[in-house]
Image (tube, rainbow, N blue to C red):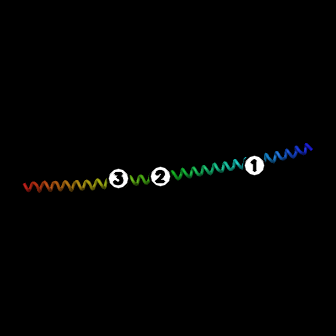
Amino acid sequence: MLASTNEYLQEAAETIFRMSADDLIRKRCREREEYYQDLRNYERAIAEKDEKIQRDRIEHEQDKRNYERKIEEDKRNYERQIEQLRAEIEALKAQNQQEI
């Protein structure tokens, strides 16, 4: 009777061991899949941030070029105004000379 009990106990122990091992393997597989999913999520987040940085950089460069164009345009306008004012001054000087 002890032998058969031991045999049953041995078989039960082996079954429990296999089930535990299967659970451990499943757990490790789930953990590995979660790891790869997290890795893909991190890579996607990094790629999105890199794209945003690139878009922001392009937008910044465009803003900078527009700002520089505006400065040049303002400079030309101011130079024209200065020339017009100088011409007016010269005309007023000439008019003043004629009146004297």
Which amino acid, by three-letter code, is at mark 1? Answer: Asp
Rendered image: mark on residue 38: none
Asked whether the residues under the numbered discs 1 and 3 touch, taking CB atoms below 8 Å apart as contact, a structural biologist would say: no
Rendered position, 79 above or below 5: below
Asked whether the residues under the numbered discs 1 and 2 touch, taking CB atoms below 8 Å apart as contact, a structural biologist would say: no
- Quarter containing the C terminus: bottom left
SS of the residue at dot 2? Answer: helix
Which amino acid, by three-letter code, is at mark 2? Answer: Gln
Q: What whole-number distance in Å separates the C-alpha atoms at marks 1 and 2? A: 48 Å
List x then y, in percent, for residue 93. 13, 54
- Left or right relative to 53: residue 94: left
Which amino acid, by three-letter code, is at mark 3? Answer: Glu
Q: Name the residue under label 2.
A: 54
At horizontal 10% and vertical 55% (from top left) the residue drawn is: 96
Asked whether the residues under the numbered discs 3 and 2 touch, taking CB atoms below 8 Å apart as contact, a structural biologist would say: no
List x then y, in percent, for residue 60. 42, 52
Total label count?
3
Q: What whole-number distance in Å separates the C-alpha atoms at marks 1 and 3? A: 68 Å
- Quarter containing the N terminus: top right
- Left or right relative to 83: residue 19: right
At horizontal 88% and vertical 45% (from top left) the residue drawn is: 7
Q: What whole-number distance in Å separates the C-alpha atoms at marks 3 and 2? A: 21 Å
Mark 2 residue crowding within 10 angstroms, few (<14) / some (14–19) / many (20+) = few
Mark 1 residue crowding within 10 angstroms, few (<14) / some (14–19) / many (20+) = few
Q: Which of marks 1 and 3 is nearer the N terminus?
A: 1
Rendered image: mark on residue 68: 3
> Farthest residue toward the left?
100
Q: Earlier in the sequence, mark 3 or mark 2?
A: 2
Rendered image: mark on residue 22: 1
SS of the residue at dot 1? Answer: helix
At horizontal 64% and vertical 50% (from top left) the residue drawn is: 34
SS of the residue at dot 3? Answer: helix
